Image (spheres, rainbow, N blue to C red):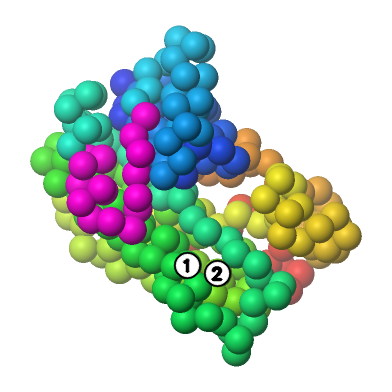
Amino acid sequence: MSLEERVVVVTGAARGLGRDYALSFASDGAAVVVADLDEAGGRETAAAIKSAGGRALQFALDVTDATSTRALAEAATSEFGRIDVLVNNAGVWGDLERSPLAETDPRYFDLVMAVNLKGPLLCSQAVLPAMRERRWGRIVNISSIGAYMASGVYGVSKLALNQLTFALATEVGQDGVTVNAVAPGTIANEATLRQVGESALEGLVNRAAIKRPGTSDDLYSMIRYLASDEAGWVTGQTIAVNGGFGSRL
């Protein structure tokens, strides 16, 4: 599953899992466009890639703005000549435990849906012309186990993202482009601990078949497969990478 010479755009790559994905793609030989609203964090990720001998372009991206996403595609093709893979990782989680839907501020609802749903659509629309021109492309959306749990607006946005994945896949399959989603389970990182705390994290892990939290490497293995030639007949799917959590619901 060689990624040598591929050009990969990763949104939300300034920190956390997005940064890990960007570094992993670069380690596998891909040129990486580090796209994030956090310009300083994006520069740090791009610098880390370059210092390791990789190729990277940092771009300050607002995924909710069509002008920004189009500019991203233009910058990527200008720098590297094409776009092969888009990983729609940028997202907002929010205060899930204390923001039930019945009490959700409409402005917060709009924000989550704009970033988690509209963002992947706008980014996909921006890169599709370059992919269609070469009749090869991979779009990987980062969904969540939260799509299947009571997790407020976040869960609503991720379940809608799964449908967006399927619908878009049906439209672009004839152009050589696949669209899939990865739905992570419980990941032991700073963001998860900040949202749910150590006690709740342990409870979630214990509900899975494999009694450990996931890692960015667990997720990247699936993302890497979906971005490869070998996954050419896999499209429209939301694939759970969650240690068997769903089997215990």
- Mark 1 residue type: Val
The front one of 49 and 177 is: 49
* In the image, residue 70 lies in the stretch drawn in magenta: yes
Left or right position of 148 against 224: right
Residue 91 in view of the camera = yes
Q: Residues within 10 Å of mark 2 (few under 14, many from 20)?
A: many
The image shows residue 231 at horizontal and vertical percentages of: 39, 43
Nearer to me, 35 or 177: 35
Residue 53, numbered label: none
Badge 2 amino acid: Tyr
- How crowded pointer 1 is (Cα within 10 Å; few <14, some 14-19, many 20+) is rated as many
Q: Residue furthest left?
A: 133
Image marks 2 and 1: residues in contact by CB distance under 8 Å: yes
Q: Which residue occupies 29% across, 51% down?
A: 123
Q: CA distance from mark 2 to mark 1?
A: 7 Å
Q: Depth check: 144 or 98 in front?
A: 98
Residue 118 location, x and y as percent?
A: 34, 64
Instruction: Give the residue number, with chain letter if any, for mark 1.
Output: 112
Q: Residue at x 35, y 53 (%)?
A: 63
* Residue in the image at 11% along x and 41% along y: 133
What residue span does the magenta drawing correspond to?
58-73
Q: Which residue is mark 2?
A: 154
Describe the element under mark 1 as helix, strand or loop: helix
Examine the image and state in which quarter residue 103 appears. bottom right
Mark 2 or mark 1, earlier in chain: 1
In the image, residue 193 above or below residue 57: below
Residue at image coords 20%, 47% = 70
